[in-house]
C-alpha cells in the first residue's frame, strides 16, 4: 500500500505527501473518501471527513472511513479549537458561502491547513472571457455559471491578498496544469489550480 | 440457499442483585437471550443487538407467540448484512420486558407477580443488566453494539457508561434524550392503559383478564408515530375498508382505522401492559447529557469506540436533528464518528424495513 493510487489527482497527491505520518486529519468536503483512503493507507493518519452528499458519505462509510454528513458552512463550529493536526479543504473554498470565515474555521480547527482551489485567472479562462465575453467552461470547471457550485470564484492573486489580510502564513504552495506540477513563475497565469499549506 | 439458522435460546439468572439508578436493587434477575452464529475462540467476533421498545430477543428467529420471522431477520443471518457466518450475534430481552427477562409480570420473592411493585428502571439499568450478561459469558470488548430507536439509546448508554465494552457503536433512528413530544406520546399510551378498567392498578395477572383495550389504544397511538404522513397517505389514503361508501357510523370505515385496530389488537397477544408502562417510562427518563453533568460531549469523554449514527429523513419521532446533537457531541469529544441521514419513505420504522443503503452502511462500518 505504499504507492499512491495511480489515479489520485495531483493536488491530492501533493497533500498526501506532506501530511505528517499518523496525524489527525479533518477532510472538509471529503467526497467519496478518495483522499482519506490514500491518507490512511499511505500515511497511517486518523482521518475524519465531512461531506454534504449522503450518497458520498455512504461510500466513505462502506470503505471503513469515518465521515459525517454535514454542511461545512454551518457544522464546523462544533469542532473544538485545535482538535486536528491538519484540516483540509480540497476544491471546496470556492463553494463556501463565506470563504473568508471558512478559512478562519479551518485554521481554528487544524494547526495546519491545506487548501486547494481552481484558479480563475488561468490564461485559458482569461482568454475565453476576453474573446467570448462569457463565463468560461473548462475541463476543470465544466459547469455553466447558473448551475455551478462554485459561487465564489477566485484567483491565486486573490488568495494571496486574503491570506495577507488574515495574517495567515504560507508554509508551502504547489501549482498544477494538466494534472502536472509547474513552477511558481507567473502561476496566476499558468496554473489551472493551486494547493497551499497554511498555518497561523 | 439459506442454511438452517443456528440460533439458541438461553436464560441467565444473575448471581448478584442488580443495583438500579433509583437506588433500589432487583434480586434474582433473569435475562433471556438468543444467540446466532459461532463464537470465535478469542471472543473477538461478538455483535450485541439491542432491541426497541416493543421488540424482543427474537431478532432473527421465529417469534414463539406469533410465529412470525424475527424482527430483523432480513439483515441478520448467514451471508446477510450482520453475517452470522462471521459474527456471533447476541440479543437479550431488556429487563422490564415480558419475553423471559425479569419484568413486572415476573414473580417476586414471595411468588407473586411484581405488577406495579416492580421498581422503575432506566435505560442505564437495562444496559447494566446486559453488561452483567456479558460478564457472565466472559465477553470483554464487543466487536460492535447495534440498536435502533430505544436500542440505539441502549447502545449510546453503553458507550457512555461502559466505554471499554464495545469497539464499534451503531445507533439507528435514535436520540440521546427523550423530547417533550416523545414523552407526550408515551403518556397518552400509559393513560390509555391505566384508564382500562381491567388494568386494576396493574393487578391483572391472577385472573388473566388484562387491559387489552387500553394497551391496544396505546399501540395504535404509538404506531402512528412510527410512520410518516406521506407513507400513510400512500398506503391507505382515504380508501374505505371492504365497503363502497361510508357507513355513517363508527365502524372502521377507513383502511387506516382497520389497520390500526389490527395493529393494536395483535399487539396485546404478545406484550404485557405493565411492561409497556415500565419501558416507556425508562425511555422518557433517558437524557444522556443530564446523566453526565448536563453536557452531552462529557458523556463520551472516555469513549474509545468508533461510532456510526444513522437517521431517516421522514422520521419525525427521532428526527435527524436529534442525531446531529449526538454527532456534534461526539465530534467535541474527538470520537471517530460517521453519520448519514438516509432517505426512506417509511418514517421511524425505516430502520426495520428494506432500506438497501442502511445495509450497505452497516456492512461497511462493521468491517
Image: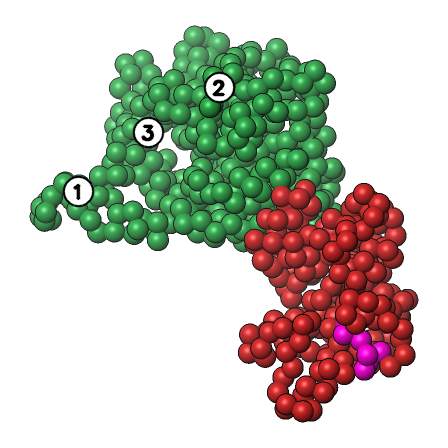
> Which is nearer the eye, B34 or A88?
A88
Residue B176 among those drawn in magenta: no
Which label sits in the foreground, 1 or 3?
A: 1
Residue under label 3: B267
**Circles 1 and 3: CB atoms closer than 8 Å:** no
Residue A126, picture quadrant: bottom right
Q: CA distance from mark 1 to mark 3?
A: 21 Å
Could you tell me which residue is drawn at 62 percent across and 87 percent down? A134
Q: Sequence order check: which comes first, mark 1 or mark 3?
A: 1
Q: Sequence order check: which comes first, mark 1 or mark 2?
A: 2
Dot 2 falls on which chain? B
From the viewer's perspective, tell me whether residue B347 is left or right of residue B239.
Answer: right
* Camera sees residue A107: no
Q: Quadrant of the C terminus of chain A?
A: bottom right
Q: Secondary structure at mark 3?
A: helix
Which label sits in the foreground, 1 or 2?
A: 2
Q: Which residues are magenta?
A: A187-196
Could you tell me which residue is drawn at 62 percent across and 40 percent down? B364
Residue under label 2: B3
From the viewer's perspective, tell me whether residue B240 is left or right of residue A93.
Answer: left
| Figure chain in green | B
Q: Secondary structure at mark 2?
A: loop
Q: Secondary structure at mark 1?
A: loop
Coordinates of residue A186 in the picture (x, y in percent):
87, 81
Coordinates of residue B326 in the picture (x, y in percent):
61, 47
Dot 3 falls on which chain? B
Give the label on residue B217, or none. Answer: none
| Figure chain in red | A
Give the number of callouts: 3
Amino acid at each position: 500500500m505504499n504507492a499512491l493510487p495511480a489515479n489520485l489527482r495531483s493536488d491530492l497527491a501533493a497533500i498526501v505527501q506532506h501530511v505528517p505520518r499518523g496525524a489527525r486529519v479533518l477532510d472538509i468536503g471529503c467526497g467519496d473518501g478518495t483522499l482519506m483512503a490514500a491518507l490512511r493507507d499511505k500515511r497511517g493518519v486518523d482521518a475524519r471527513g465531512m461531506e454534504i452528499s449522503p450518497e458520498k458519505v455512504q461510500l466513505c462509510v462502506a470503505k471503513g472511513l469515518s465521515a459525517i454528513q454535514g454542511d461545512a458552512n454551518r457544522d464546523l463550529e462544533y469542532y473544538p479549537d485545535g482538535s486536528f493536526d491538519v484540516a483540509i479543504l480540497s476544491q471546496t473554498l470556492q463553494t463556501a458561502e463565506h470563504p473568508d470565515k471558512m478559512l478562519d474555521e479551518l485554521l481554528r480547527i487544524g494547526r495546519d491547513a491545506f487548501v486547494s482551489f481552481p484558479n480563475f485567472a488561468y490564461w485559458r479562462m482569461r482568454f475565453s472571457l476576453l474573446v467570448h465575453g462569457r463565463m468560461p467552461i473548462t475541463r476543470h470547471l465544466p459547469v455553466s455559471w447558473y448551475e455551478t457550485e462554485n459561487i465564489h470564484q477566485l484567483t491565486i492573486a486573490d488568495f494571496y491578498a486574503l491570506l495577507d489580510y488574515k495574517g495567515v502564513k504560507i508554509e508551502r504552495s504547489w501549482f498544477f496544469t494538466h494534472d502536472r506540477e509547474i513552477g511558481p513563475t507567473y502561476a496566476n497565469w499558468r496554473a489551472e489550480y493551486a494547493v497551499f499549506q497554511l498555518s497561523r | 440457499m439459506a442454511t438452517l439458522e443456528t440460533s439458541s435460546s438461553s436464560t441467565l439468572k444473575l448471581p448478584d442483585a442488580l443495583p438500579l439508578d433509583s437506588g433500589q436493587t432487583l434480586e434474582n434477575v433473569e435475562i433471556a437471550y438468543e444467540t446466532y452464529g459461532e463464537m470465535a475462540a478469542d471472543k473477538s467476533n461478538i455483535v450485541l443487538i439491542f432491541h426497541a421498545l416493543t421488540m424482543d430477543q427474537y431478532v432473527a428467529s421465529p417469534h414463539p407467540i406469533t410465529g412470525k420471522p424475527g424482527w430483523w431477520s432480513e439483515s441478520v443471518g448467514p451471508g446477510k448484512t450482520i453475517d452470522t457466518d462471521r459474527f456471533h450475534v447476541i440479543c437479550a430481552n431488556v429487563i422490564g420486558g415480558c419475553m423471559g427477562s425479569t419484568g413486572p409480570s415476573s414473580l417476586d420473592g414471595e411468588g407473586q407477580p411484581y405488577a406495579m411493585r416492580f421498581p422503575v428502571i432506566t435505560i442505564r439499568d437495562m444496559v447494566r443488566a446486559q453488561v452483567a450478561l456479558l460478564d457472565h459469558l466472559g465477553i470483554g470488548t464487543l466487536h460492535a453494539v447495534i440498536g435502533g430507536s430505544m436500542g440505539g439509546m441502549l447502545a449510546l448508554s453503553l458507550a457512555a457508561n461502559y466505554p471499554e465494552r464495545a469497539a464499534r457503536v451503531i445507533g439507528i433512528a435514535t436520540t440521546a434524550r427523550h423530547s417533550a413530544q416523545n414523552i407526550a406520546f408515551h403518556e397518552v399510551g400509559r393513560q390509555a392503559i391505566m384508564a382500562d378498567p381491567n388494568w386494576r392498578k396493574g393487578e391483572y395477572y391472577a385472573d388473566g383478564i388484562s387491559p387489552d383495550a387500553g394497551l391496544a389504544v396505546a399501540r395504535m397511538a404509538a404506531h402512528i408515530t412510527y410512520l410518516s404522513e406521506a407513507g400513510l397517505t400512500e398506503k391507505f389514503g382515504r380508501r374505505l375498508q371492504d365497503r363502497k361508501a361510508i357507513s355513517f357510523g363508527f365502524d372502521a370505515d377507513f383502511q387506516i382505522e382497520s389497520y390500526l385496530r389490527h395493529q393494536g389488537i395483535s399487539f396485546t397477544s404478545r406484550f404485557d401492559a405493565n411492561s409497556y408502562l415500565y419501558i416507556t417510562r425508562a425511555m422518557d427518563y433517558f437524557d444522556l447529557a443530564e446523566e453526565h453533568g448536563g453536557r452531552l460531549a462529557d458523556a463520551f469523554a472516555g469513549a474509545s469506540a468508533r461510532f456510526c449514527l444513522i437517521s431517516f429523513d421522514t422520521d419525525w419521532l427521532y428526527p435527524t436533528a436529534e442525531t446531529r446533537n449526538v454527532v456534534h457531541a461526539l465530534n467535541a469529544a474527538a470520537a471517530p464518528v460517521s453519520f448519514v441521514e438516509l432517505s426512506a419513505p417509511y418514517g421511524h420504522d425505516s430502520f426495520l424495513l428494506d432500506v438497501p443503503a442502511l445495509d450497505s452502511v452497516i456492512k461497511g462500518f462493521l468491517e
